Amino acid sequence: QAQLVESGGGLVQPGGSLNLSCTASGFTLENYAIGWFRQAPGKKREGVSCHSTSHGTTYYPDSVKGRFTISRDNAKNTMYLQMNSLKPEDTAVYHCAAHRIWSSSSFVCTGLYSFDYWGQGTQVTVSS
């Protein structure tokens, strides 16, 4: 069964770092646009990092720009989200996603509402 499986969430103090991983099985991640999304209780889902293979672009909203970095390792069929200088407002469930689309990274993060593959989510809590 093709799927995405995340790992790496947890509890971290403000100013700390976390690196989330998301491994694909049953399909080749290299051929897909990828993204990380988060949702906190009572808030709308937010695309925090997206990369478009077709356009070679990466998108970050202002809320995480300069702090978060998306990357992928095609040999490991895995995508990552490096999160630095974490803030309490970054607390949320984080999901990875992949979608086969010819599109810019900004559209993947802000315009898509369904994806070919969606991870189960990992909790990130930023608190002292």
Image: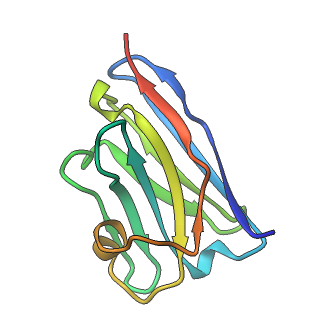
- Residue 54 lies, with reference to residue 41, above or below; the image says below
Q: Identify the coloring.
A: rainbow
Which residue: 40% across, 47% down?
38
Outermost top residue: 128
- Residue 70 lies, with reference to residue 67, above or below; the image says below
Which residue: 65% across, 69% down?
74
Q: Position of residue 42 (x, y in %)?
A: 30, 38
Q: Position of residue 13 (x, y in %)?
A: 40, 16
Residue 106 relative to residue 38: left or right: left
Which residue: 69% across, 76% down?
28
Outermost left residue: 62
Residue 57 relative to residue 2: left or right: left
Q: Position of residue 78 (x, y in %)?
A: 65, 59
Q: Nearer the viewer, residue 15 or 38?
A: 38
Which residue: 37% across, 10% down?
128
Q: Position of residue 49 (x, y in %)?
A: 37, 57
Quadrant, the N terminus: bottom right
